[in-house]
Amino acid sequence: MIFVTGGTGLLGSHLLFQLTNSDVQIKAIYREEEKIKTVEKIFSFYDPINFKNRLKKIKWVHCDILDIISLEEELKSCKTVYHCAALVSFYRKDFYQLMKINREGTANIVNACLNNNISKICYVSSTAAIGSNDDIVTEETKWKQSPSTSGYSISKYSAEKEVWRGVEEGLNAVIVNPCLLIGAGNWKESSMTIFKTIDDGLKFYTSGSNAFVDARDVAEIMEKLMNSDINNERFLCIGENSSFINMLSIVAQKLNKKAPSIKVSKFLMKLSWLISGIVSKMIGKKPVITKETANSAFSNTIYDASKVKNTLNFQFKSLEESISNAVQGRIE
C-alpha cells in the first residue's frame, strides 16, 4: 500500500490521480474533510467517465503529521511513502508554525518510516530549499541563509535535512524540488491564487521572474523516481523559467482579461509592504504583501532542470499548456 500525506493539496491531488493510473491501493491522510471534495472534482475533471473507480483505490484516513502515534499506526500496512504535506507562508509570525509542520512534521514522517521499515520515501521539497546565489541554479547550488531568507525557505531546508538524516540511518529517499505549481484546482488556495487575482483584474506587474511547473509533470516525475532504482538524490522540477509579465499575460489572454500594464518600481513595492504591515496590525489580519514576497517580485533566478530531464528522459509541458489546463480546470 502507498501512503500519501498532503493528498488534498494542489500537488497531492494530482499525485493521487497519477497513482490511480495503476492498480494500486493508496492510503491518504487528511485534516479537513471538505477538501476531499476538491480532490474528487479534480478527478472528475481529468477523467469524467472513470473517476469514481479511481477514487475507490484511495482510503482516506484522518491523521496529522504532528501526531506521531497515529502516524506509526497508519504506516504499518504501507510499503512506500509520498510526503507532500507542508505549510506555505511568507508571514513572519508564522515562522514557528512553519518549523513545526515542515521540519518537525517531516522528522515525524522520517522516524515513522524508519520504524516501519518503509522501502522508500519521496519528499516534496521546494526551490526555496535550494540556494539562489548562482546565475543558474542546479541541485548542487549551496543554500545560504541571509537576512532576506524567508521563514518558509528555512523550514523547507530544515525539513530536507531531516530526510538526509533518515538516509544516514538507512532510509531510501528521493527529493523533488518543484517551483511554482500550476494545475487544475481551487483558485483560492496555494499558487493558484494568482489566477483569481488576474481574473478579478490585476493592473500591476514587476520586473521579476520565476520558474513554473505543471502539477501533472511533478506527479509523474515523483512516481517514476519511486519506481526506479534511484535513491538518495534530489531533483529540480522546472517546467519553464518566465518573467512575471509573460506568465501574467498568458493567463490574462486565456481568461479574456486585460494583461497587467503598470510596472511597479522597487520603491513603490517597498512602500506597499510597509503600509500593508501597518494595516495588518491595525485590523489584526495577515498582510497582503510581506517583505519576502516583495523581494521575490524582483528576483530573476534561473533554475536548471537538466538533471531530471536527462535522468528520466522527461519532457515538461509548456507554460502555455499548463495555464490552459489550469483555466479549464478551475474548481470553486
Image: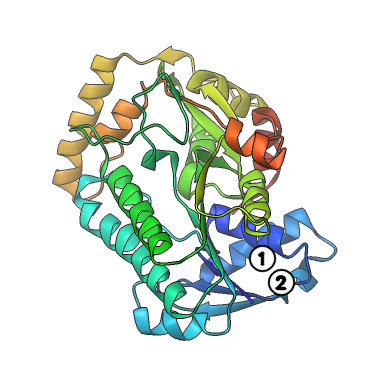
Q: Image quadrant for the N terminus? A: bottom right
Seen at 53% across and 28% down, the residue is 304
Q: Which residue is mark 1?
A: 40
Helix, strand or loop at label 2? It is: helix
The part of the image, by quadrant, that contains residue 170 is bottom left
Seen at 71% across and 38% down, the residue is 314
Q: How is the image coloured?
A: rainbow
Q: Give the class, few, some or many, for how many residues have Cα within 10 Å of label 1's Cα (few <14, many ≥20).
A: some
Whole-number angstrom distance, CA of label 1 to CA of label 2: 7 Å
Q: 73 above or below 252?
A: below
Asked whether the beta carbons under mark 1 and mark 2 sit within 8 Å of each other, the answer is yes
Circle nearer the N terminus (1, 2): 1
Seen at 50% across and 38% down, the residue is 180
Residue 219 percent coordinates (x, y): 63, 52
Looking at the picture, tell me which residue is in the foreground, 31 or 219.
219
Looking at the picture, tell me which residue is in the foreground, 158 or 233.
233
Residue 224 percent coordinates (x, y): 68, 53
Residue 296 is tagged as none
Residue 183 percent coordinates (x, y): 62, 45
The part of the image, by quadrant, that contains residue 205 is top left
What is the three-letter code of the residue carrying label 1?
Answer: Glu
Seen at 51% across and 73% down, the residue is 29
Q: 138 above or below 98?
A: above
What is the three-letter code of the residue carrying label 2?
Answer: Leu
Can the viewer see residue 89 in this picture?
Answer: no
Residue 14 percent coordinates (x, y): 64, 55
Select label 1 or label 2 by which is in front. Answer: 2
Looking at the picture, tell me which residue is in the foreground, 211 or 31.
211
Q: 156 above or below 75?
A: above
Residue 55 is tagged as 2
